[in-house]
C-alpha cells in the first residue's frame, strides 16, 4: 500500500524505505523551534538531561514573541533566560526585538523552513509550515529539550484525511474562511492525531499567505499536521526566501486515507467561529446582531501582508466605530515595513486603528489588548476558548481580516461585501 | 505502580487555556502554576484537590496550546492519573514525557462519577471503582511509550541514550 505525503517525509527522515500509520519512529529534524514561554522550560530540561551543546547551531530557532516586548518583570526574566542560552550556545537563529516577528510568520520569511523538512516547535501552531510542503508539528518543552540534545524526535506515524479542494473562492473569502469552514464541518477533534492533506485543483487559487493560514489552524481540528503539495507558487516562494535545497514529496496514488472530503471553494461564504470553540461556525449571513468592543487583526494565523492588504481595502476612507478599539499587529518587521511602503499603515491610522510592533500578546490574553469582563472581540487569531484573551466571561469571535475590519467599522460583526457600497451602515 | 484517589469530572474539550490560563505563563514553576490550575472553569479545584486524586473527562482533553505548563500544573496539583475519552495529541505526548499517567478509554468515562473513589493498578492494567465496587480492564501502553514511562519520562530516556 502507498504512503501519504506526510508518511513519505517521515520515512525519509527516519532512514526507512516505508512507514505505516501507527508505527513509532525516531526522525531526524531540520529545525527545532521555541519561544519565550516554552523555551525556558525546555532549556531547564535540556540541562537536566545532561545536554552540553545543542546538536546543531543552525537548526535551532528561538523567538521571543509571546510576552515580548517584555510585558512585565517575570516575562523579562524569561526572555533574558532564553537570550542568555541563545548567546552561550551561539544559536544562529535567535531574533531579538527589532528583528523579531511572530515565529510562524518569521521562519518561512527567513527561509528557515523549506519543502520536505521535518520541523518540531514548542508551539502548537508549528503546523503552519505544512503550507511549504514540509512536515511540521507542535510539541511540548520536554520534546524540544530532547530534540536540542539529539536532533531527533519520536513520532507515531499518522494516518490522514484528504481534503479535495475544488473551484475558486469568491472575492471576500480567504484562507481563514476556508479553514473555519472545514473545522466547522469536521469538529475540533475531527482530525485528532491525523494529517490533514489538502489536494485538488482549487489549490492553484490559494496564495501562499492563504495556505499558511489554512495549515496554521490544522491544530484547531486536532490534527498533527496540515500539508499542501508543492506547486509553482511554493517553489517561487522558497526560492525567493531561502538558499537551501528542498525536496518535493508526493503522496502515492494508492495512499490510504481514513476519509476524503470534497470541498467546493466557490460555495464557501465568509465564516465566523462563535464562542467558545473554533468549530462553532456560522456564515456571515447567519451571524445576527453581535455588538463588539474590540477588533484584533494579526497573529501567526493572519498577520501577513495579504491579511493587512485585505483589512486596508475595507478600512480605506472609513472610520473605526466610536468607542471601539481596533488593534493591528503586522506579524514581522518585514511585513510592517512593506505595509508602511504600500500605505496600509496610513490607512489604518487614519481610520482610527492602533498599530503595534509584532507580538503574540493579545491572542493568548498576554498583553496589548486583554479583554475585560463581558467584552466581545472579533479577532483574526486562532482560538476562542473561555478566557483565552482575558476575563473568563469575555467572548472571542474568530474571523478573516476583511470581516474583522468591516466589524470594526460597523461596531458589530459585519459582512465586508456590504461595507464598500451603499450597504455601509456608518 | 498503584494509585488511589477521588474523581474530579469534566466534560469535552477541556483546553489548555482553562487548565492553566496564559496570564500565568510568565513562570515555568509548577508549584506556582498549580495554584491557578483549572480556575477559569472550576474555581475551587486548587483548594479541593488532594494528592492521588484522578481527573476523568470527555473527549479531546488538553486541546489547544502546546504549553507543557498544563500537564505540569495538573501533576503538581497532586493528580495521579487522567482518564478521558480522548486526549489532544500534544497534551498526550507531553503527559508521557513528564511522567503523568493518562488513560484513553471511551466506555470507562461514563461509568465513573464525580466524587467516586477509584484505584488504578498500572501493572495489572485494572481500574477498581471502590465507590461502585466494579472492576475494569485497561489496554497496556504501546511498547515504545512503555520504554519512556519505564525510564521515568523522556528526560531520563534521553539521559540513558546519551550515556550509552
Image: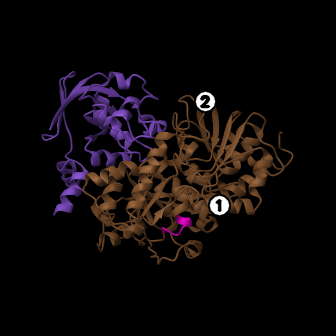
Chain colours: A brown, B purple
| Quarter-of-image position of residue B123 | top left
**Residue A4 in view of the camera:** no
Nearest to N terminus: mark 2 or mark 1:
1
Labels 2 and 1 within one chain: yes
| Quarter-of-image position of residue B130 | top left
| Chain bearing mark 2 | A
Q: What stretch is highlighted in magenta?
A: A108-113
**Residue A332 in view of the camera:** yes
- Disc assigned to residue A372: 2
Q: Nearer the viewer, residue A297 or A267?
A: A297
Residue A129 in the image, given as x and y percentages of width and height: 49, 62
Q: How many labels does the image show?
A: 2
Residue A420 in the image, given as x and y percentages of width and height: 82, 50
Dot 2: few (<14), some (14–19), or many (≥20) neighbours within 10 Å?
some
Residue A364 in the image, given as x and y percentages of width and height: 53, 42
Dot 1: few (<14), some (14–19), or many (≥20) neighbours within 10 Å?
many
Q: Tell me: A180 left or right of A74.
A: right
What is the secondary structure assignment of the residue under circle 1? helix
Residue ID at (59%, 58%) = A98
| Quarter-of-image position of residue A250 | bottom left
The residue that label 1 is drawn on is: A335
| Main SS class of the magenta portion in the image | loop
Amino acid at each position: 500500500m502507498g504512503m501519504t505525503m506526510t508518511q513519505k517525509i517521515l520515512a525519509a527522515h527516519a532512514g526507512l524505505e516505508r512507514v505505516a500509520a501507527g508505527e513509532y519512529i525516531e526522525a531526524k529534524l531540520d529545525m527545532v523551534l521555541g519561544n519565550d514561554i516554552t523555551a525556558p522550560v525546555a532549556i531547564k530540561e535540556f540541562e537536566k538531561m545532561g545536554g552540553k551543546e545543542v546538536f546543531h547551531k543552525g537548526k535551532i530557532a528561538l523567538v521571543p514573541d509571546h510576552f515580548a516586548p517584555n510585558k512585565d518583570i517575570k516575562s523579562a526574566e524569561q526572555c533574558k533566560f532564553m537570550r542568555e542560552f541563545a548567546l552561550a550556545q551561539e544559536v544562529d537563529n535567535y531574533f531579538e526585538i527589532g528583528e523579531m516577528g511572530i515565529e510562524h510568520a518569521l521562519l518561512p520569511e527567513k527561509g528557515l523552513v523549506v519543502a520536505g523538512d521535518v520541523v518540531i516547535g514548542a508551539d502548537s501552531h508549528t503546523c503552519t509550515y505544512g503550507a511549504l510542503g514540509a512536515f511540521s508539528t507542535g510539541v511540548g518543552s520536554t520534546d524540544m529539550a530532547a530534540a536540542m540534545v539529539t536532533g531527533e524526535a519520536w513520532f507515531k506515524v499518522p494516518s490522514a484525511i484528504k481534503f479535495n479542494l475544488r473551484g475558486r473562492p469568491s472575492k471576500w473569502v480567504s484562507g481563514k474562511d476556508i479553514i473555519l469552514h472545514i473545522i466547522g464541518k469536521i469538529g475540533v477533534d475531527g482530525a485528532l492525531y491525523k494529517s490533514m492533506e489538502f489536494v485538488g485543483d482549487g489549490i492553484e487559487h490559494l496564495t501562499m499567505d492563504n495556505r499558511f493560514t489554512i495549515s496554521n489552524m490544522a491544530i484547531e481540528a486536532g490534527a498533527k499536521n496540515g500539508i499542501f503539495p508543492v506547486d509553482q507558487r511554493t517553489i517561487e516562494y522558497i526560492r525567493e526566501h531561502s538558499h537551501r535545497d528542498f525536496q518535493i514529496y508526493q503522496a502515492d496514488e494508492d495512499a490510504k486515507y481514513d476519509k476524503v472530503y470534497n470541498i467546493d471553494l466557490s460555495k464557501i461564504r465568509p465564516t465566523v467561529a462563535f464562542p467558545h470553540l473554533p468549530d462553532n461556525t456560522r456564515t456571515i449571513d447567519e451571524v445576527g446582531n453581535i455588538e463588539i468592543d474590540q477588533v484584533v487583526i494579526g497573529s501567526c494565523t493572519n498577520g501577513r501582508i495579504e491579511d493587512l492588504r485585505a483589512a486596508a481595502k475595507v478600512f480605506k476612507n472609513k472610520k473605526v466605530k466610536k468607542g471601539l478599539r481596533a488593534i493591528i499587529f503586522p506579524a514581522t518587521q518585514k511585513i510592517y515595513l512593506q505595509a508602511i511602503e504600500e500605505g496600509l499603515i496610513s490607512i489604518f491610522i487614519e481610520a482610527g486603528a492602533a498599530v503595534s510592533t509584532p507580538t503574540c500578546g493579545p491572542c493568548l490574553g498576554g498583553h496589548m489588548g486583554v479583554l475585560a469582563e463581558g467584552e466581545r472581540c472579533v479577532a483574526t487569531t486562532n482560538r476562542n476558548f473561555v478566557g483565552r484573551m482575558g476575563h473568563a466571561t469575555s467572548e472571542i469571535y474568530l474571523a478573516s481580516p476583511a470581516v474583522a475590519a468591516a466589524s470594526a467599522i460597523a461596531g458589530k460583526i459585519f459582512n465586508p461585501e456590504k461595507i464598500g457600497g451603499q450597504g455601509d451602515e456608518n | 505502580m498503584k494509585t488511589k484517589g477521588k474523581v474530579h469530572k469534566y466534560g469535552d474539550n477541556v483546553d489548555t487555556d482553562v487548565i492553566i490560563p496564559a496570564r500565568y505563563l510568565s513562570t515555568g514553576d509548577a508549584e506556582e502554576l498549580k495554584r491557578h490550575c483549572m480556575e477559569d472553569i472550576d474555581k475551587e479545584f486548587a483548594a479541593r484537590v488532594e494528592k492521588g486524586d484522578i481527573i476523568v473527562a470527555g473527549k479531546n482533553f488538553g486541546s489547544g496550546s502546546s504549553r507543557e505548563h498544563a500537564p505540569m500544573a495538573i501533576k503538581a496539583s497532586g493528580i495521579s492519573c487522567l482518564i478521558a475519552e480522548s486526549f489532544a495529541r500534544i497534551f498526550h505526548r507531553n503527559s508521557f514525557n513528564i511522567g503523568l499517567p493518562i488513560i484513553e478509554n471511551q466506555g470507562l468515562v461514563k461509568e465513573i462519577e464525580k466524587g467516586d473513589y477509584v484505584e488504578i493498578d498500572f501493572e495489572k492494567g485494572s481500574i477498581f471503582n471502590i465507590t461502585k465496587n466494579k472492576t475494569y480492564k485497561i489496554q497496556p501502553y504501546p511498547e515504545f511509550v512503555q520504554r519512556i514511562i519505564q525510564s521515568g519520562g523522556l528526560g531520563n530516556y534521553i539521559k540513558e541514550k546519551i550515556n550509552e
